[in-house]
Amino acid sequence: MTVATILSRAQFGMDSPPVRVDVHVGGGLPQFSIVGLAATAVRESRDRVRAALVSTGFRFPDGRVTVNLSPADLPKEGGRFDLAVALGVLAAAGSLPQERLAGCEFFGELSLAGELRPFHGALPACLHATREGHAVVVPAANEREAGVVRDARVAGARGLLDVCLHLRGERPLAFGCGTLVPPPAYRGVDLADVRGQADARRALEVAAAGGHSLLFIGPPGAGKSMLAARLPGILPPLADDEALEAASVQSLGRDLPPVEHWRLRPFRAPHHTTSAIALIGGGGRPRPGEISLAHHGVLFLDEFPEFARDVLEALREPLETGCVHISRAARQASFPARFQLVAAMNPCPCGYHGDESGRCRCPRAFVERYVGRISGPLVDRIDLHVPVARLKYASLGGAAPGESSAVVAARVAAARERQLARGGLNAALAPAVLEDAVRMPADTRRLFGVAVEKFGLSARSCHRVLRVARTIADLAGVDDVGNVEVGEALRYRRLDRGGG
Ligand SMILES: Nc1ncnc2c1ncn2[C@@H]1O[C@H](COP(=O)(O)OP(=O)(O)OP(=O)(O)O)[C@@H](O)[C@H]1O
Ligand SMILES: [Mg+2]
């Protein structure tokens, strides 16, 4: 046998397309080449593979060794193909039985001593391989992550030697799969720490219940950042498929949490100096941005107007579609980005506009320009605009602690159940089904019409008011949306009414 084929997979966006590693060993002067649109790290694989084979006790074949990674037009990156290349060389040289390689995919970067190093993207690779009915061999450090896939056949190996002994039938690897564990008890910050601020707490609960985006506006130290950080604590844990999707993105983003934490909602809070690429995703080798790392979780943008304008504008499309497409000459990468946006801002450059103390000295034009940094279309896309006033000293010291996150989370969970029984979260209700989902008595309908005219709400804003009103009714456990619900939802459109 002079040609051997090993199966593996590349990674492009969320896609893990299959790659065949064909290795030919022939006569001629000693040479080792890798072809097939391989990036530098893949071409460097030659040196790692040669060293790893020798360290493991094999003889590197004499003559010409050619490795072809196909399809040739697919970009290939990283050290993930090392194991497949090494096995291909051995199989082509006749040191491994070909037939045992079939139906199995191999991944992992080799050290010079022949140990297997973990690679990024083991979870999506295993998801795709399992869908095709293939077993998977990964570095031992990736085994837990890949093994979470339902019905997967995954084996972890510590080094090249383990894999070779398995393929020769001398010491078989154990193939199996694990499961997603239940979420650990929530141990983050608790809502009970927040004193007073009843309106802002209520808005946070409404946002959590319906999956709505939210903007807090208020003076420094009012508790905006504090409230936002407590949103993940009142959201229900992720379901199986949500947890796998979120973890798949994170495994590409280089900061995959341990499997025990996969059901916790992601919470991402990028700094306001973050670039558009870091927020949205991209780069020569497309990587997920913060909005995708926050998939199924919370994206918190503190000091909202301080973000560069182009960065904020780039948010508009994913906010609407729940995904990002990044076009590259070779192909298009897509990442999911269904996140819940929470933003916080001061009402003016000094931060105290509208404060009772009257200490704000910002000219009116400054205030308008500051609020204007967030464009109309972006404001339009945020469901709840919530003023957070400075807390009175009496409330800070004397008030009894507020409800705990666990109590609020129970109400949120009940409201979400009502929505899921209807088919999905209110924040994502399509305009076409809004009519059906939001039934209003005639006088509420009339009042709503008057308010829309008075505040000059756009069609998109109207839909948002209706969705929020639906959530408020779901929290109350009622079927129809009445004056109370619509009234509260309208109060959350403060910026549409020119309020700064
Ligand atoms: N409602 C509150 N209950 C208890 N502590 C509070 C409250 N509001 C503010 N604090 C205290 O003030 C600190 C600052 O609050 P926080 O960072 O949330 O303010 P902020 O509104 O985000 O201000 P900035 O506009 O400066 O970002 C908190 O860490 C907390 O100690
Ligand atoms: Mg803050």
Image: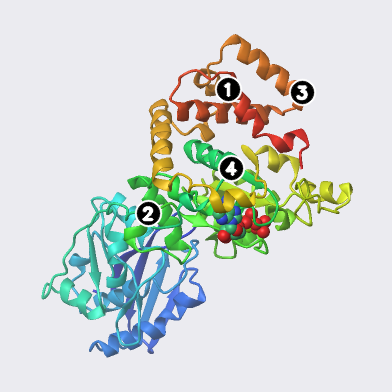
Amino acid type shown at disc 4: Ala
Q: Earlier in the sequence, mark 3 or mark 4?
A: 4
Q: Earlier in the sequence, mark 3 or mark 1?
A: 3
Residue topped by disc 2: 186
Q: Earlier in the sequence, mark 2 or mark 1?
A: 2
Residue topped by disc 4: 200
Q: CA distance from mark 3 to mark 1?
A: 18 Å
- Residue at disc 1, secondary structure: helix
Query: Could you tell whether 124 is left or right of 352 in the image?
Result: left
Percent position of residue 335, x then y: 51, 52
Residue topped by disc 1: 484
**Which picture quadrant has residue 424?**
top left
Q: CA distance from mark 2 to mark 1?
A: 33 Å
Residue topped by disc 3: 454
Q: Decide if residue 300 is in sight here.
A: no
Q: CA distance from mark 3 to mark 4?
A: 25 Å
Q: Decide if residue 18 is in sight here.
A: yes
Q: Earlier in the sequence, mark 2 or mark 4?
A: 2
Q: Quadrant of ligand 2?
A: bottom right
- Residue at disc 2, secondary structure: loop
Which residue occupies the foreground of this view, 392 or 472? 392
Query: Is label 2 or label 1 in front?
Result: 1
